[in-house]
Image: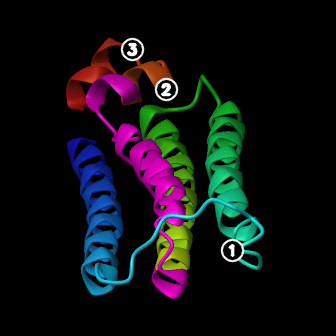
Amino acid sequence: MNTKLKTLQIIHLALCSGVFLFALVTIFLNREMMFFDANPKTTSPFNPIFPIMGLITISASIFFYRNLMAKIDKNAPADTKINMYQSAFIISSAMLEGGALFNIVGFFMTHNSFFLIFGAANFIFLILKRPTKNKLISALQLQYPDTEAL
């Protein structure tokens, strides 16, 4: 089971690294043309779409994670529980990554750094989602013999 936790941590690191590096590249490419404008009248077609999608992906990530975690049978073997946890974690993290990347693309297209706020919010939620042994034990309510294998 130790390899499953390490696998999740590597997936998490890859998702975070991808978002962070993409944001750095887009900021580097747009550094001369960047501006900040939160007024919906001046940034009409994009302003409501990108921030709302960022917030929707955060909400959907939390909703799907809780929904999938609720479906885990508490009496199931530890391997089954961990596999279900992996699915819930990957789906939740992918939604957060999608919201962050969507807003970074919005910044890249419009040069408006306002969209980076919502990309950063998704990115922060993604960072906080990092799987650890303690989070896994508490989320799955694992007991002694199974916790030592982590």
Q: Which-is-in-front pick, marks 1 and 3?
A: 1
Label 3, label 2: how far apart the Cα atoms are: 9 Å
- SS of the residue under disc 2: helix
The residue under label 1 is which amino acid type? Thr
Against 106, residue 15 (above or below) is: above
| Of 105 and 99, the residue lying toward us | 105
Can the viewer see residue 98?
yes
Q: Say which quarter of the image contains residue 16.
A: bottom left
Against 18, residue 6 (above or below) is: above
Residue in the picture at 29% in, 22% down? 147
Against 11, residue 62 (above or below) is: above
Does the magenta portion include 129?
yes
Q: Is the magenta stretch mostly helix, strand or loop?
A: helix
Residue in the picture at 67% in, 42% down? 68
Which residue position holds label 1?
Answer: 43
Estimate the x, y position of residue 46 in percent, counting from the top left.
70, 76
The residue under label 2 is which amino acid type? Leu
Which residue position holds label 2?
Answer: 140
Q: Which-is-in-front pick, marks 2 and 1?
A: 1
- SS of the residue under disc 3: loop
Which residue position holds label 3?
Answer: 143
Estimate the x, y position of residue 12 in percent, counting from the top left.
33, 55
- The local crowd at label 3, few if under 14, some if 14 to 19, many if 20 or more residues have their Cα within 10 Å, is few
Tell me which segment is drawn in magenta.
108-135
| Of 11 and 147, the residue lying toward us | 11
- SS of the residue under disc 1: loop
Q: Which-is-in-front pick, marks 3 and 2?
A: 2
Work out whether mark 2 precedes mark 1 in sequence or the reverse, and give the earlier one. 1
The residue under label 3 is which amino acid type? Gln
Residue in the picture at 66% in, 67% down? 50
Side of 149 relative to 118 (left or right): left
Q: Are marks 1 and 3 in contact (CB under 8 Å)?
A: no
